[in-house]
Structures are given as structure tokens and as C-alpha cells.
Image: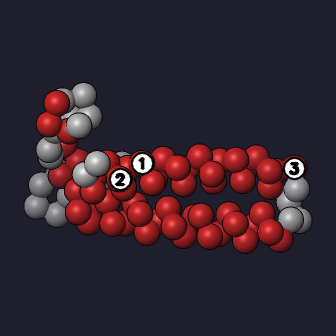
């Protein structure tokens, strides 16, 4: 697996864990352990996203630099063979 796929896989895993923790925290808002885990996984996700964007470009349009050109549409689209 290439670095790009590894980072995307980690981001998806972090998203899953964060969503599950969100659901738990919705019903247990005073759980210090769950809140600690939320913050920890949120930090890990942000590092993975930052690394991905720095190496491969934006994941979401809000991450596009747009300084010289609109870089959101650079590179192959997800459904194109080159992207996978």
C-alpha cells in the first residue's frame, strides 16, 4: 500500500472512532475517559490530514490554497484509475 492510501485509510479509521466516541459522549457527556480519547483521536486525525494535504493536496475544497490557481481540481479524480 502506498503512502497516499495509508494516510487515507488512517483518516477513515480516525473518522470512524471519532463518530463512535461522539455518539457515546452524546449519552455520557461527563465521561473524562471518553473525552480524553476524543481529544487524542482528534489530534491524530488532524496530523494525518495535515500530512496528507501537505503531500498530496486537499481532501476538501476548504483546504485548497487557491493562491496561484484553484488546486482543488488538480490531479486525478477518485474514480480515475490514476487515483487508485
**One can see residue 29 in this view:** yes
Could you tell which of marks 3 and 1 lies nearer the N-terminus?
1
What is the spatial separation of the Cα atoms under label 3 and label 1, in whole angstroms?
28 Å
Please report the residue visible at 70 percent of the width from the left and 47 percent of the height from the top. 20
Lateral position of residue 38 relative to residue 47, left or right: right
Q: Determine contact: label 1, label 2, CB under 8 Å.
A: yes
Which circle, 2 or 3, is nearer the viewer? 2
Q: Which residue is tagged 1?
A: 9
User: Which circle marks residue 29 in the picture?
Assistant: none
Above-or-below relation of 79 to 83: above
Lateral position of residue 48 relative to residue 42, left or right: left
**Picture colour scheme:** secondary structure
Q: Nearer the viewer, residue 25 or 71?
A: 25
Q: Nearer the viewer, residue 68 or 19?
A: 19
Horizontal and vertical percent position of residue 57: 24, 56
Q: Which residue is tagged 3?
A: 27
Image quarter for residue 32?
bottom right
Considering the numbered disc 3 on the image, is that residue within a helix, a strand or a loop?
A: helix
Lateral position of residue 32 relative to residue 62, left or right: right
Considering the numbered disc 1 on the image, is that residue within a helix, a strand or a loop?
A: helix
Amino acid at each position: 500500500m502506498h503512502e497516499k492510501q495509508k494516510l487515507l485509510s488512517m483518516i477513515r479509521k480516525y473518522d470512524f472512532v471519532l463518530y463512535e466516541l461522539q455518539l457515546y459522549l452524546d449519552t455520557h457527556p461527563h465521561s473524562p475517559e471518553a473525552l480524553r480519547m476524543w481529544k487524542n483521536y482528534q489530534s491524530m486525525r488532524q496530523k494525518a490530514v495535515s500530512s496528507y494535504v501537505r503531500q498530496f493536496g486537499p481532501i476538501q475544497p476548504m483546504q485548497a490554497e487557491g493562491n496561484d490557481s484553484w488546486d482543488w481540481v488538480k490531479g486525478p479524480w477518485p474514480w480515475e484509475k490514476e487515483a487508485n
